[in-house]
Image: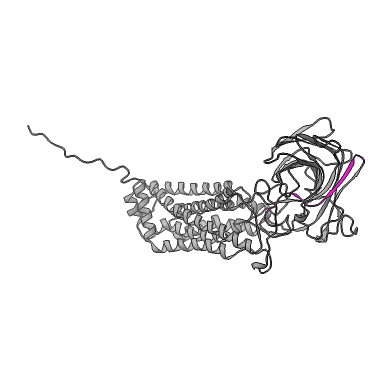
């Protein structure tokens, strides 16, 4: 009997014909086409170079003669306005302050010609800015930028509890009048401040609680008033900047002021907090401070307690953001979507798609490998270029006299890596559309119509404000929102439009772009499986 011996064969290495090998093959295709590599490098240089070479100057001519203004920084690291009139007393430990606000009146200076409450009657007009404020406050100190919590009556937004400049909680709605006053109360327990309001002084409602970092020892408690710059927009569309600002003054009338936990027999003393940093457009207003008659007080103030927003609408100095230096991203995106579309369409044009599909019968996996390769290339190079824009560009602009609004390192990383991700996802979208249409010119035109055209419409304000805003919500151009570094604050009036602000939040906007890319790649995969190697259905 003859035995048949089967020769030993070593087991096949795992992943030998797997996705990693497919990635290597697609990467080899990309890097061996010198024109594509050069184009991507040029796009990267444009993103970084334009951002560095086009700084935003804060004074005519820029250069060494420009001085960046001193701006207070709040507890959360944001640039803030912190100027108001205070009638206060020390509060060495736990305690509370209660007061009844009986009226809130104001004056607005037209045409930026501010004289003050005692100026000529034809110079000032009676009026109340929507976010004029009068109320009670507990603050760590009177140094601008200190941690604080306040209960206040506003010009048009009812009672609010605000703390640490960026936080805002709604209280009792409605207008203030002599017949309908508002009772306000703040209690301190260590570093925890709780705010209450009441319509009758007997039934109290808790509005909110704030934990203020560093609120130890003796703090300052009292009554305050302030009124921010009056911002009047004059732009009809979402993307068109414009507006005028003028100074304003607010006067709050208080009664039944009661400080518990303070020094027995302590007296109320007045102070102008942050007067040297106040953002007056003209001369500092006169008549500020407080007056006491028996148990009643009148506090008159001008300025604001709140965050600085982009565009300089609530400052008297030019402000910038880290994304001001990212105009080159738009140019680089155009080049990258062309390369991404050609990554597949050139194989149809040259008849190489049959070879590619024969080597990788699992067509969806082949398309995924192409998407990963083009996505990684654009993400890595795009992120590196944006990092140069943000870091070097901001330093150059700062030296030119513009105050660049500070952001946390997490926000800076999100802008840099998020913009790189936006470029990668846009490239994947172009790849998917290129697979569907199979022709380079048609595919690139389609991607431009999908991403670039909506962005131009939204930023330039060709349509109405509402229509432009929706264009940047529902089209792939929403992905540009990932570049936004400074949040929008409802308690600060301003021009909240692109390129500093977008209709959607950063991650929401990027998610819209991701959804379009997923649909495009899904449709491309389905068509790849239905078509023959030549592309016919």
Q: Is residue 520 left or right of residue 274?
A: left
Q: What residue is at 37 percent from the left and 53 percent from the top?
A: 26
Give residue 148's quadrant in the image: top right
- Quick check: 204 above or below 244? above
Q: Is residue 187 left or right of residue 446?
A: right
Q: Is residue 352 left or right of residue 479?
A: left
Residue at the far bottom in the pictured view: 61
In reply to whether residue 505 is colored magenta, the answer given is no
Q: What residue is at 45 percent from the left and 56 percent from the top?
A: 340
- Of residue 370 and residue 247, the one placed in the foreground of this image is 247
Coloration mode? one colour
In reply to whether residue 300 is colored magenta, the answer given is yes
- Of residue 251 and residue 287, the one placed in the foreground of this image is 287
Q: Is residue 7 left or right of residue 170?
A: left
- For the image, the number of numbered tags is 0
Residue 359 image point, x, y percent: 32, 50
- Of residue 273 and residue 131, the one placed in the foreground of this image is 273
Q: Point out the image quarter for the N terminus.
A: top left
- Quick check: 61 above or below 239? below
Q: What residue is at 55 percent from the left and 49 percent from the top?
A: 510
Give residue 293's quadrant in the image: top right
Residue at the far top in the pictured view: 203
Residue 156 at least partly seen: yes
Residue at the far left in the pictured view: 1
Residue 458 image point, x, y percent: 62, 56
Residue 199 image point, x, y percent: 83, 34
Q: Which residues are magenta?
A: 294-312
Residue 294 image point, x, y percent: 92, 40
Give residue 18's quadrant in the image: top left
Residue 529 at least partly seen: no
């Amino acid at each position: 009997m003859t035995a048949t011996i089967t020769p030993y064969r070593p087991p096949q290495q795992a992943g030998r014909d797997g996705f990693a090998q497919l990635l290597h093959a697609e990467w080899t295709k990309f890097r061996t086409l010198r024109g594509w590599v050069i184009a991507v490098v040029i796009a990267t240089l444009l993103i970084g170079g334009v951002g560095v070479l086009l700084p935003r100057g804060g004074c005519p001519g820029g250069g060494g003669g420009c001085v960046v203004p001193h701006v207070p920084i709040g507890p959360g690291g944001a640039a803030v306005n912190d100027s108001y009139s205070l009638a206060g007393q020390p509060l060495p430990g736990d305690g509370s302050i209660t007061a009844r606000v009986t009226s809130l009146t104001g004056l607005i200076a037209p045409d930026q010609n501010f004289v003050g409450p005692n100026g000529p009657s034809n110079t000032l007009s009676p009026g109340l800015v929507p976010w004029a404020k009068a109320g009670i406050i507990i603050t760590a100190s009177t140094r601008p930028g200190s941690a604080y919590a306040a209960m206040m009556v506003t010009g048009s937004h009812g009672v609010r509890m605000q703390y640490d400049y960026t936080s805002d909680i709604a209280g009792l709605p409605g207008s203030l009048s002599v017949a309908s006053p508002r009772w306000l109360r703040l209690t301190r327990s260590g570093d925890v401040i709780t705010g209450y309001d009441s319509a009758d002084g007997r039934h109290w409602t808790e509005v909110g609680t704030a934990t203020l970092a560093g609120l130890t020892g003796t703090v300052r408690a009292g009554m305050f008033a302030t009124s921010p710059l009056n911002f009047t927009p004059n732009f009809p569309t979402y993307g068109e900047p414009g507006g005028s600002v003028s100074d304003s003054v607010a006067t709050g009338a208080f009664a039944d002021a009661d400080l518990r936990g303070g020094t027995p027999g302590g007296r109320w003393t007045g102070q102008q907090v942050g007067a040297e940093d106040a953002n007056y457009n003209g001369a500092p207003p006169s008549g500020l401070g407080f007056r006491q008659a028996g148990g009643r007080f009148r506090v008159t103030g001008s300025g604001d307690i709140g965050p600085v927003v982009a565009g300089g609408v609530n400052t008297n100095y030019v402000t910038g953001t880290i994304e001001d230096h990212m105009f080159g991203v738009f140019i680089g995106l155009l080049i990258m979507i062309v390369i991404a579309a050609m990554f597949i369409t050139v194989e149809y044009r040259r008849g190489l798609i049959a070879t590619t599909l024969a080597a990788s019968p699992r067509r969806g996996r082949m398309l995924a490998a192409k998407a990963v390769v083009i996505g990684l290339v654009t993400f890595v190079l795009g992120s590196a270029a944006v990092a140069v824009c943000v870091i070097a560009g901001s330093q150059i602009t700062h030296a030119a006299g513009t105050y660049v609004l500070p952001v946390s390192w997490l926000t800076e990383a999100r802008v840099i890596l998020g913009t790189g991700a936006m470029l990668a996802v846009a490239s994947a979208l172009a790849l998917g559309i290129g697979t569907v249409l199979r022709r380079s010119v048609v595919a690139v035109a389609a991607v431009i119509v999908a991403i670039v055209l909506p962005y131009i419409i939204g930023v330039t304000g060709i349509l109405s404000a509402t229509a432009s805003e929706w264009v940047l919500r529902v089209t792939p151009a929403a992905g540009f929102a990932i570049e936004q570094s400074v949040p929008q604050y409802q308690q600060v009036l301003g021009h909240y439009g692109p390129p500093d602000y977008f209709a959607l939040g950063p991650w929401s906007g990027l998610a819209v772009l991701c959804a379009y890319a997923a649909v495009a790649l899904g449709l491309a995969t389905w068509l790849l499986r239905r078509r023959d190697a030549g592309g016919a259905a």
